[in-house]
Image (spheres, rainbow, N blue to C red):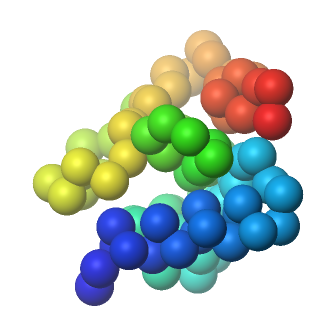
Amino acid sequence: MDYRTRLVNARLQMEAMGMDALMLSTGLDLPYLIGYSASPYERLTMLVVRSEGEPVLVVPELEAPLVDTSEDLFDVRAWAETEDPTVIAADLAAGA
């Protein structure tokens, strides 16, 4: 799979639609876009794609070692039990 091309195409669509940020969680979108299938638990996993800059995958600290970053498509922001992942994701999308 050419995930890099998929991310580029997603950003092109974002630009065409006037979107500054795209936020994806569990479901079929994550594996399609970056090849990662998030566990369907109550813990938040969210990919934040801004119109500029590296996409960031917000993922529970315990699941971070399962994320394949070998293609260098996105950064990983692992969150600990004492952190609020919705605040982290919102901060990553701030200003969008």
Q: Residue at x 81, y 35 (%)?
A: 96
- Is 84 placed left or right of 60 in the picture? right
Q: Is residue 62 visible?
A: no
Q: Is 70 positioned to the left or the right of 65 in the image?
A: left
Q: Residue at x 28, y 85 (%)?
A: 1
Against 88, residue 25 (above or below) is below
Viewer-side residue, 27 vs 91: 91
Whole-percent x, y for residue 57 in the image: 49, 45
Q: Where is 79 relative to 9, above or below?
A: above
**Of residues 7 and 87, which is closer to you in this image?**
7
Q: How far across and down, in percent of the image, does residue 73 sit?
A: 32, 53
Q: Say how many tags the image has.
A: 0
Picture layout, residue 23 above or below residue 94: below
Report the front residue among 40 and 75: 75
Instruction: Determine if residue 64 is in view.
Output: yes
Q: Position of residue 62 (x, y in %)?
A: 38, 38
Which residue is rendered at x = 45% and y = 75% of the image? Answer: 6
> Residue at 37% of width from left, 38% of height from top?
75
Is residue 43 placed above or below 77 in the rendered structure?
below
Residue projecting furthest to the left: 70
> Where residue 22 sits: x, y (%)?
71, 55
Quick check: 44 left or right of 77? right
Residue furthest to the front: 16
